[in-house]
Image (tube, rainbow, N blue to C red):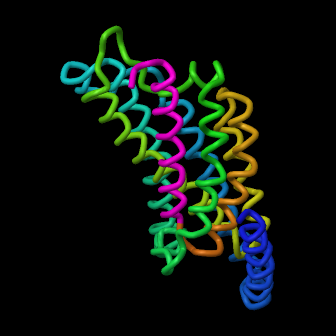
Amino acid sequence: MLARLGRHLRSAFDAIEAESRAETATSDPLASQRRVAVVLVTAGLSLTFIHYLQGSGPLVGLSEATTPEFARLARWTAVNLVGYLVIPWVVVRFVLKERVAEFGLARHAPGGWRPYAVLLVASLPFVVWAATLPSFQSTYPFYRLGPGESPWPWLVAWWGLYAAQFVGVEAFFRGFLVHGTRARFGAGSVFVMMVPYLMIHFGKPAPEALSAILGGVVLGFLSLTTRSIWWGVALHVAIALVMDVTVLIGAGVL
């Protein structure tokens, strides 16, 4: 199963490189460099925005209606979505003057789910194992239940926000960064993306940060191959929820 996925990725690498060389031969080099510069500067501004504005305070207006923990995480989600989605989309539409769908937001072709299903099956044993480690148990879930608090409704509501922010993560890294630099760097665009993707995992458990290198590369190649991030979003959400639920089961909460 994994060998088949490896062959798929090698084939994707060759196809991406050939396509990139063909585009480079027929495009304006200055326009290509400008596009890469706009994408990377925007990425830097977006990541800076997220880092400094996430903060620890609640989202205004939610503290009274929800729990302080949910209001805090709602702010975190809102800032992530602006940084990962809104800022890049505005740049794509009004600076690059291109279609947002060309940056990994197209629909998957029929059968495009199969390599992601392989990744999910291969990942689950490691996710369940990691959930038994103290470093992961002290990190997940992000929503910390108060004494005697039930998972319903606010932990479950948080999972909805958590899923939404993964749309932003995949759209930014496997969409905007990868497809925005593909014409210039070819398959190398995946490795350009992988470095900042790894860095947003600093502060999380070391095994998760290290797995972000491999996961970022594999998901990057799959996005380039399929021209779509959507099954990557589904995979990311599934793994994150399995981690949360497994930790909570181990703690006797579920």
Left or right, 96 with reference to 30: left
Q: Looking at this view, is 161 or 211 the one in front?
A: 211
Determine the main secondary structure of the stretch shown in magenta.
Answer: helix
Which residue lies most toward the top here? 147
Instruction: Give the residue drawn at x 53%, y 50%.
Output: 236
Which percent across, then down, holds residue 111? 52, 77
Residue 185: tell me if it is visible: no
Residue 239 lies in the magenta stretch: yes
Residue found at x 65% / y 33%: 129
Quarter of the rendering containing residue 1: bottom right
Most foreground residue, 125 or 91 = 125
Q: Is residue 66 visible?
A: yes
**Residue depicted at x 55% and y 46%:** 46
- Asked if residue 189 lies left or right of residue 52, the reply is right
Figure label count:
0
Residue 253 in magenta stretch: yes
Q: Report the magenta residues as a range.
A: 229-254
From the top left corner, tell me how far across and down residue 128 is, in percent.
Answer: 60, 36
Q: Is residue 217 above or below residue 161?
A: below
- 7 shown above or below 210: below
User: Percent from the top left, x then y, of residue 63?
Assistant: 26, 20
Residue at horizontal 75%, vertical 80%?
20
- Where 201 falls versus 30 (above or below)? above
Farthest-out residue, left: 65
